[in-house]
Image (tube, rainbow, N blue to C red):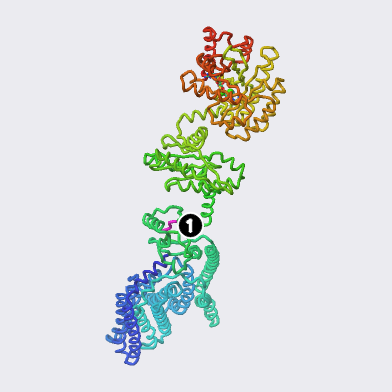
Amino acid sequence: MQLLNADRVQAAAISDPATQRVMAWLCRGYLVAGMLLTVVYFVVPTEPAKLVVWPIIGWSSVLAILVGVAVNRPEPRSAWYLLAAGVATLIVGDDLYSIRNFVQHADALFPSYIDIVYLAMYPLLVGGLALLVHRRSVGGDRSSVIDASIITAGLGLVSWVLLIAPYLHSGEFSVFYRLTSIAYPIGDVAVLAIAVRLAVGGGRRPGAFWLLTGGLVALLGADALYGYLNLSGTFSEHSPVDVGWIAFYVAWGAAALHPSMRGLSTATPGTEQISAGRVLVIGGAVLVPPAILFTQGALGNVTDPLAIALTGGLLIILVLVRIVSLVRESADRRSNARLQTLVDKTSDAIVVVDGQGRIQYHTPSTERMLGRHAAELDGTRLGDVLEAADGNRLDAMLVSHAAPATIEWRVRHTDGGWRDLDVIVDDLRGTADIDGIVFTMRDVTERKQFDLKLRRQTLHDSLTGLPNRMLFIDRIDQALRRGERRNGSVAVLVLDLDDFKMVNDSLGHAAGDDLLKAVTARLVTVTRSADSLARLGGDEFGFLLENGDVDDGSELAALRIQAALRAPFRVGDSEMQVHASIGIATGSLRTHTCDDVLRDADLAMYFAKRKGKDRFELFFPAMHENATRRLEVVADLLGGMDRGEFVVYYQPIVDTRNGHILGAEALVRWQHPRRGLVGPDEFIPVAETTGLIAPIDRWVLNDACRQTKIWKVNGLADDSFYISVNLSSQHLQDPSIAEHVSDALAVSGIAPDAVVLEVTETGLVDDVDSAGAALAGLKRLGVRIAVDDFGTGYSSLTHLIKFPIDILKIDKSFVDRVADGANGEVMVRAVVDLAHTLSLKAIAEGVEHPDQARALERLGCNVAQGYLFAPPVPAPDMTALLAQQSVSSDFLGPDIRADVEQSAISESQVLLSRP
Ligand code: C2E
Ligand code: CA
Ligand code: CA
């Protein structure tokens, strides 16, 4: 990251190509001028050469460096100022020396103040070069330091043996002389060390680099040569050795002018491989101590065994350290390579962005994941690859420095499709290694799509594609919440097709499925966009209404639905009419949960069914109580049967003219352990819907027949006495009904003609064919058939003729009005006449007043039952009545009538006084 940043800085610096060109020309021109001056220097005599040409060369170098710094603006400038100062001290020293030598013609004095000027150059050069080296290296760059140390130690030893030690050992000079003499080679070794470090370390190596190092080599070479010649006393002024120094001046001036000098302070990581050249140089350096030892040994004069041994030891240690670090580096490299391979091969994509969201690094997998080339990604803003909303969130994250640990992104792949990504975010801005935000992205598109499919499957009905009950409940829940915010409520309609089971049973399940699909299609047409339609299961559908539709709208919606279903449906070859019962419930979150609303609508639908189907009902709270009661009853009913809690009451059927008991109707009651005596109206309907009615009817039939047999055997009832037993229409449809009746007859041993079976009019017309067949079967046994509640149903005359009927029981609702006036009488007369025409017997039900009895008599109906004569009573009471042989020998007498009414009231009180 640092590297990239530095590159950008660098790119910004070399922005002006014109300036660059000028500087390149200047640099070249200066080099050429330097060469010409060199020639001039050697052509002219020593004095002008030393006093004119030399200063020009030296000071031009200082000037060139200052110009270079001003134009090229290198970083750090201080390094170059130090270098310029170093060069300046050198030329000052040279000039002072020349002036003393050729102007003052003074004797060479050594050491002198000039040496102080000269020696001052070393720290300046070392400091300037050190600053540059520091800029050029990444991190510690330990191996370069070691390599440089090895080479310096090797060359340093040479310098020691040849230049330094001779002065140290020689006794002929003063201490001051000797110290000054060795200060030069020591300074050179210091410059050498830093020069080697510059050469072997990392960093860019543009033209300026080579000029700088070339100048150093020239300087050090000239110094070494000078030292050696001086020592051996063969040095002379104005000799070829001067070329080295001139080259140093010119090369450094040119280096500073060169436009690439700025790049010198650019770091690059040290090369990981150790080059053959470097191995050679290091090897050479290591071999210096033994080589010197060998040479001196051969010459028979080993001068510095200690220095040679110490340097040899130091070199061995340095080489060992270098080997260890090489081994470590290669291990690091291997693990880095492994890491890189893993990163390359992983399907997860890793992207690093800088503070502006620009991609600084990405793994190859990123290209695959997004379908983009590396060139399209590098430096691009990551936000531009994302969906707009995700991009904005990313920008906010960059600014706020508050990155969430995980996020989800949707990105457009270049193949046109979208990709869902799970992203892990690590904000590593400000850390040394990364300095950016790391996004680790995983492509979860397939998993997301699978989830979605699974969700669809679990939340939708496979046949119709509609939402299922689970999703519907969820939608109600959401609607309730939305409603709460707007202070509104929701309406739920539950629709159940009427008699759908018949379609399945008669046409098969495939036809049933087709019909459901056709119904769905029609329901969809009446569903408004804001509302939802769902299949709740079987033939049950749900509507959810929101917004204005809730109050009156829900009933309008129900009407719309009914209208949509009105036209006949074609299923296979047949056409059929489909009706539906609809329950409507409304609710708001304050009072209802989603389950509540659905349950209420369900209940209302159930009431619509009970009220005759093909209609809709609005829920009201009493429905709920009713339903709870029903549930309790269902739960209880089975147990009640097992525990023998049912009892049969008997209501006498009498001859109104004399009160003689002609027969009795068996009416069941439930002696409930908690609720007391429960009337049939409370549990018969429940028993009918739960299939419990057949066992109850059968038990009543058996018990009544048994009781009748007892009365007959005891002589309390004569041969003509009959028992009238109610048969539910459900039971009538039971294929084994005839078997049940014949069993009862056989077990009790009473004659078939002593048994009347009462079936309701509605029970007969519901299914005319099967009812006719069942009645015929019963009739063959010899029992008689009565039509109960006659007048309340819709039986046509054809039915009455078709069915083998013996008795019509005129419903209480007619009897109630028979004494009221002309109208009521007309109805009853019609029924009685009809009975007589068809040679049927008519029995009036629910006679409560003597007026009614007399009116009936006048119309020709003199068989009746009712509280006027006797309420339904338990068997022992009936036994007592039979013993009297009539309900009352003089039932018109006021005393007895009062008794009877009293008993009727007491029974109704019993019936009414439930908890
Ligand atoms: P239902 O067959 O029409 O029975 C006559 C009903 O009228 C009886 O009601 C009886 O108590 C009542 N009643 C008789 N005289 C009078 C009167 O003067 N005034 C008034 N207000 N009511 C009178 P109950 O016993 O409550 O039975 C009700 C219905 O329950 C019966 O109507 C019958 O449909 C059904 N039921 C009773 N027992 C059985 C049974 O064992 N099996 C079947 N399937 N249904 C039964
Ligand atoms: Ca009856
Ligand atoms: Ca009746």
Q: Position of residue 430 (x, y in %)?
A: 40, 59
> Which residue, given by chain and number where applicable, does mark 1 sit on?
421
Q: Position of residue 692 (x, y in %)?
A: 61, 29
Find ligand 3 in the image and state its quadrant: top right
- Residue 336 vs 548, above or below: the answer is below
Q: Position of residue 753 (x, y in %)?
A: 68, 21
Nearer the observer, 518 or 845: 845
Q: Position of residue 879 (x, y in %)?
A: 63, 12
Q: Residue furthest left?
A: 104
- Residue 424 vs 754, above or below: the answer is below
Q: Main secondary structure of the magenta part?
A: loop
Image quarter of the N terminus: bottom left
Nearer the observer, 44 or 197: 197
- Residue 900 vs 557, above or below: the answer is above
Q: Quadrant of residue 832?
A: top right
Q: Is residue 240 visible?
A: yes
Nearer the observer, 430 or 81: 430
Badge 1 amino acid: Leu
Within 10 angstroms of label 1, few (less than 14), some, or many (20 or more) residues?
A: many
Q: Is residue 317 magenta?
A: no
- Magenta stretch bounds: 426-430
Q: How many marks?
A: 1
Nearer the observer, 158 or 709: 709
